[in-house]
Each structure stands twice: as structure tokens, then as C-alpha cells.
Amino acid sequence: DAIFGRINSYEGKGGGGAVFLGFAKRRLPRIRPTLLEQTGVAALRFDFPGRRMQLSPVPLIGWREDALRLIDLRPRGTPIANYACRVERLVVNGCLVPLDRPCVAVIDTGTTGLSVSEDLYDSGILPVPVREAQIEMRTERGGVAVLEASVRRRRRPYPGVPTIEQPLSAEEYEEFPLVVSPVPVPWFEPGFGEACADGEPFQC
């Protein structure tokens, strides 16, 4: 049996609230047990075009295959081991963003669009409004993996991004919404998450 979503209380902080079904497995001791740590799931695979998800009890990446190395941000204060990777380059609206400090991308299947830390969003180096973005990450064998988001269906070719064929008759929307939201990232602030409001040993 697995227990998920059992809470003593909930305090909303604006907007709608709920208990979310997350796919992070490892956590800090102060966080309530995750769903996946109570199962034998060892690997996840998402096929978004095919609308399929695979949960596997064994690794799905062979030792001969290239892959991105994940970074565990829990030592820096993140409550769970997000699926995070170091960013090699960030290109927004065709312009290379001059990052002056290490940058990581957190891949979250429950996020619509892009969530950007307030520090980066308000720094003045990020071209806004964001109409297209490419996040380049270095693989373990020195290759480049690219994540891309765009307001356009028929996107301009970009190295490392597979081309998705669209019929010429497909309607194009110049204002198709690409949601880019600034969010506070308190993980690295001194004292973050050291105590819960209700005194319980787990994060609330």
C-alpha cells in the first residue's frame, strides 16, 4: 500500500490549491514521503506526442546510450530531488542570454510554459516578451541536447531540435500564448524550510 495526499491542514496562498501527484522520488527528511518512494519505480519515460507514460522497475537508459547528467539540488535547499540539469546556453528570441552565474533547468511535466526565477526575469538580460526559447544542455558524452518552446507552430530550424512537419494549410497564430512566469525561488536563501508552521517534522 502507498499513502498519498494525507495532510493535517492546508493554507491557500492565492488561486486554487490541491495536492499534486508529483513524480519526484527523493526528498529531504523534512518533506513528507513521496508517492514514488513507496513504489518499486526506478525510471520514468514520457512520450508526449504519443500521449503515453511508462513507469519501469528497471533503468530505461542503457550504459551505451548518451544522456543528460542530473544535478541534485537538495544540498542547496531544494525540498525534493528535481529533475534538474546544468544549462550550457540559453537563447531567447534568437539572442544568446549572457548568464553571469551557473544556471539550471528543472524539467517538470506539470508546468505549462516556462517558469523563470524572479532574479533572472528582472535582471534585464532576458528579452521579453519571450516568443521563442532554446535551452542547450551538455550531455555526458559531450553532445548537446536542446529543449525548445515557441509561439509558432512552424518553427525556424535550430541545431539539435528535431523538425516537426506541419502542413502549409495549418493556421499560424502570431500571438499563440507562450506562458512565461516569474516565480520566487527561495531554495538558496538562509534558513529556508528549517521549520514548519504547525511544528510537524515534515514540510507542510
Image (cartoon, grey):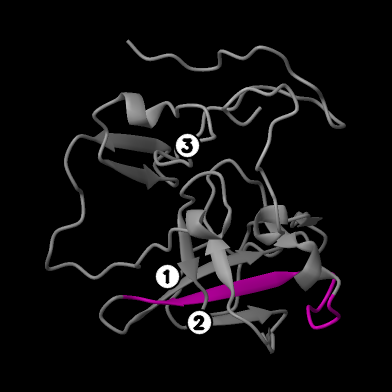
- Mark-to-mark CA distance, 1 and 3: 40 Å
User: Is residue 137 found inside the magenta-colored segment of the image?
Assistant: yes
What residue do we see at 38% from left, 45% from top?
47
- Mark-to-mark CA distance, 2 and 3: 31 Å
Could you tell me which secondary element the residue under label 1 belongs to?
Answer: loop
Residue 101 picture location, percent across and down: 64, 82
Q: Which mark is residue 88?
A: 2
Q: Judge depth for marks 1 and 3 and give the one in front.
A: 3
Q: What residue type is labelled 1?
A: Pro
Q: Which mark is residue 61?
A: none
Number of marks in picture: 3
Q: Judge depth for marks 2 and 1 and give the one in front.
A: 2
Q: Which quadrant of the rendered structure holds the C terminus?
A: top right
Residue bearing the label numbered 3:
29
> 174 or 139: nearer the eye?
139
Q: What residue type is labelled 2?
A: Glu
Q: Which of marks 2 and 1 is nearer the N terminus?
A: 2
Residue 156 picture location, percent across and down: 59, 78
Could you tell me which secondary element the residue under label 2 belongs to?
Answer: loop
Q: Which mark is residue 162?
A: 1
What residue do we see at 44% from left, 47% from top?
49
- Mark 3 surroundings: few (<14), some (14-19) or many (≥20) residues within 10 A: few
Quarter-of-image position of residue 174? bottom right
User: Is residue 12 found inside the magenta-colored segment of the image?
Assistant: no
Residue 164 can be seen in this image: no
Could you tell me which secondary element the residue under label 3 belongs to?
Answer: loop
What residue range appears in magenta? 123-139
